[in-house]
Image (cartoon, rainbow, N blue to C red):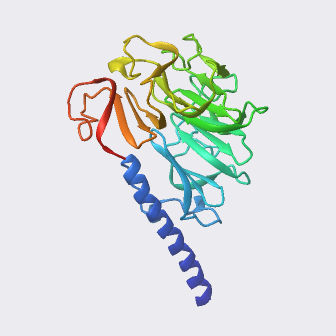
Amino acid sequence: MLKERNKNLIKLMKASIATLILGVTVFAINGHTILPLEKQKMEKLQETEIPTEYTKVASGGRNSFAIDTNGNLWGWGNNSSGQLGDGTTTDRTIPVQIKQGTKFSDISAGSHSLAIDIDGNLWGWGNNSGGQLGDGTITDKTTPIQIKEETKFSEISAGAYHSLAIDMDGNLWAWGNNNRGQLGDKTTIRRAKPVQISIGTKFSKISAGAYHSLAIDIDGNLWTWGHNPYNALGTTAEEEQTIPVKVKEGTKFSEISAGHYTSAAIDIDGNLWSWGSNSYRRNRKWINQNTNNTSPNKARNKV
């Protein structure tokens, strides 16, 4: 009897340690802390122990995801629109496994969630008010649904209410809210299913912000489109762009990130560039100025 009790105690301790480790990650990314384990409903704990080694992470508005070394997907945090994909709208203070039996290679989180499995299939769940799940509806989904089943994907990015993806052939796809031209299809019409964005080039990287989008083509050229307050697109024109426009020609880029009204990129030489709103001095540490950056500005140090 004592031996059995000790065995259960060890199992509980291991789960607690894993939760504590993950709690630090959540605090660092989202500014939220994990509730003490004894305050949680123990019946929510799964038989499988929570892993402690991961290969991918993503943080949404108030929720987080991680893919472990075995390809299993885990989520925790706010779940008001089903964005954790566990079949409920119950917030989770410890990680829960999503779509058990499926192995994943990539994850992206916004108001909704997108993931690619190891076979290149694209899945989406959560908030769908802008059609950002790409299933032809505007109904929220609490479990993953497959998007564009006939196509295999390599890259994904979940914005505030729109989605971007690159298929295995380098084609760019976009869907969801489009009130600011953030889909890049020459319109401001909402798309509840993926539409291909054809500008005569193949793409390798994408990033969906709140209302604008960034992409890098296979030659390293940087493209931007969508909402352009504070010149978040880095173009000389201040108006919105409903099709991708090339920015900082002559410079080749390798990484990009689109924020709310800001954008950042790393070129192939390791230089950091940023542009857009600087109202909260988002770039002050790197760019020695307090005004908005209307075009890409190089940081003082390489990254």
Residue 196 position within the rendered picture, expressed as x and y whole percent measured from the top left: 67, 21
Please tell me which residue is depicted at 45% across the width and 38% down the height of the picture: 61
Left or right placement of residue 16 versus residue 283 in this view: right
Q: Looking at the image, which residue sits at the far front?
A: 250
Q: Which of the image's four quarters has the N terminus?
A: bottom right
Q: Quick check: 288 above or below 197?
A: below
Query: From the viewer's perspective, is 122 left or right of 298?
Result: right
Rendered residue at 65%/55% (across/down): 72
Residue sitting nearer the eye, 65 or 2: 65
Q: Position of residue 273 (x, y in %)?
A: 36, 34
Q: Is residue 4 above or below residue 67?
A: below
Q: Nearer the viewer, residue 180 or 205?
A: 205
Task: Tell me if residue 179 can be seen.
Answer: no
**Is 133 rendered above or below residue 285?**
above
For the question of whether residue 41 can be seen, the reply is: yes
Count numbered badges in the picture.
Answer: 0
Of all residues shown, which one is farthest toward the right? Answer: 150
Identify the residue shown where x is 63% and y is 28%.
202
Which quadrant of the view contains residue 70?
Answer: bottom right
Please name whichever residue, 13 or 263, is drawn nearer the observer in this view of the structure: 263
**Where does residue 232 sit, x and y in percent of width and height?**
38, 23
The quarter of the picture where residue 49 lies is bottom right
Instruction: Locate residue 184: give its quadrant.
Output: top right
Query: Whole-percent x and y of residue 130?
Result: 57, 22
